[in-house]
Amino acid sequence: MQRLSLTQSLQQKLSPQQIQFIKLLQIPTAELETRIEEELEINPALEEGADDYDEPAADDPFADEYDDDYKERNDEIDLGSYLNEDDYNGYKMQGDGNYGEEEREMPVANRSTLTDTLMQQFGYLNLDERQELIGLQLIGSIESDGYIRRSMQAIVNDLAFSHNIFTDIDELEEVLKKVQTFDPPGIAARTLQECLLLQLQRKDLSDPAVPLAIRIIDGFFEEFSKKHYDKIQKRLNISEDQLKKVIQVITKLNPKPGSVEGEDGAVQYLIPDFILTNNNGKLELTLNSRNAPELRISRSFAEMLDTYEKSDKNNRSLKETVSFVKQKLDAAKWFIDAIKQRQATLLKTMNAIVKFQYDFFLEGDETKLRPMILKDIANLIDMDVSTVSRVANSKSVQTEFGIYPLKYFFSEGISTESGEDVSSREVKNILKDLIDNEPKSNPLSDDKLEKLLNERGYNIARRTVAKYREQLNIPVARLRKQL
């Protein structure tokens, strides 16, 4: 027998306005412009520009009437006499679920892709129908960086199942060799070793370093990749000078041949979200003007309601029109409020960062950076850590010393012998200087780097040295070795 029961529970759910604010908060200035343009397109009640309300003259006999009219239009419009609660479904924000609305087509730049380039060259091969289908399958298996990572046997199976072509690896590799003659050199390689060999085979073989480079990559690739140069010299009985010339030839090759094609040639510009200036020792922070757009409610759109006041309020089509007007007006007001809240949160957070790292922003000296984590700023501005994280994400500030991403100022602390805490960024800079000035023929190991840092007063373990080195994208000592 079924039983009915009532239970009470407390749940926290984000309102549509909160979701909209979170989305606006985390996007950078460049994307904000696009987002505002999208909202202006879909919402006729929203306009760009400052409010065009002009103060009436003091001797204007209609001043009071004009002012009351303005306030009435800008206050929350009461449409209770027009609508029931069931007639209005709420504000549907773009990107927050599928509401069955048609998606607008976005213009796409016309540019040649890697596949387009290869297909153009493929048309010049004199292949029969069977080889052509095999070649197309191979080109379709080439990834964006120019490699074929799918096994030959898997491609053989694909041809059998998809095109009813029964072939073998030998026939497949015969067509593959023709595809590998395409530009860019090294295309359709299955491994890095094969990619480098394909490029070397197109070099001038009259240069003594090229045949030697082919021999080294073909027979001693593992030793070369691990920089065991002494073993290569001993086995091939070559001089150090010969090996240097080979290394110069190989290091000029492209390990990702596909990346040179189909790339967007547009120049990417970094637009700062904040501008920090030093006015005679006083730091002044402002939002980028693009980050603080002026938006307003369309007055002509709001005036449309005046015509409905004299109409039949029971008219169904009129009620639908009023519902549409209310939806767009509410959406416009919520969007403007979200933009203003975004500006206030950005400034509040950035002001706290400037206050925390004041000495750095005055002089630009990286050694003046203090250890700072998200929680430090969250406590200063009395906001959640997630809010600070969204502000710091993809945002940057323009200073007199250059443009810095906000993430640059967040770092953990390292204790010194004197008991003070210093920023891990300071330690990383010292670590980088030590590696930059090390003897290239005998690079410093992590153990030696640890001892050098300890001698300078930084209490740091070897595993921490290794972690910072990896964060700086610096390889281990053996791979930094040069002749």
Image (tube, rainbow, N blue to C red):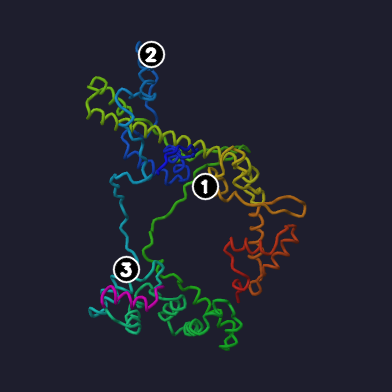
Nearer-N-terminus badge (3/2): 2
On residue 436, the disc is none
Residue 161 falls within the magenta-colored stretch:
yes
For the point 65% across and 66% down, the residue is 437
Give the CA distance from mark 1 to mark 2. 47 Å
Nearer-N-terminus badge (1/3): 3
For the point 55% across and 48% down, the residue is 406
Amino acid type at circle 1 is Ser
For the point 57% across and 63% down, the residue is 473
Would residue 326 be seen by someone viewing this image from the given angle? yes
Labels 1 & 3 near each other (Cβ < 8 A): no
- Residue 478: image x %, image y %? 62, 73
Q: Is residue 473 left or right of residue 76?
A: right
- Give the magenta-colored segment's residue range: 149-164
Q: Which residue is mark 3?
A: 117
Q: Which residue is mark 2?
A: 64
Q: Is residue 233 above or below residue 457?
A: below
Labels 3 & 2 near each other (Cβ < 8 A): no
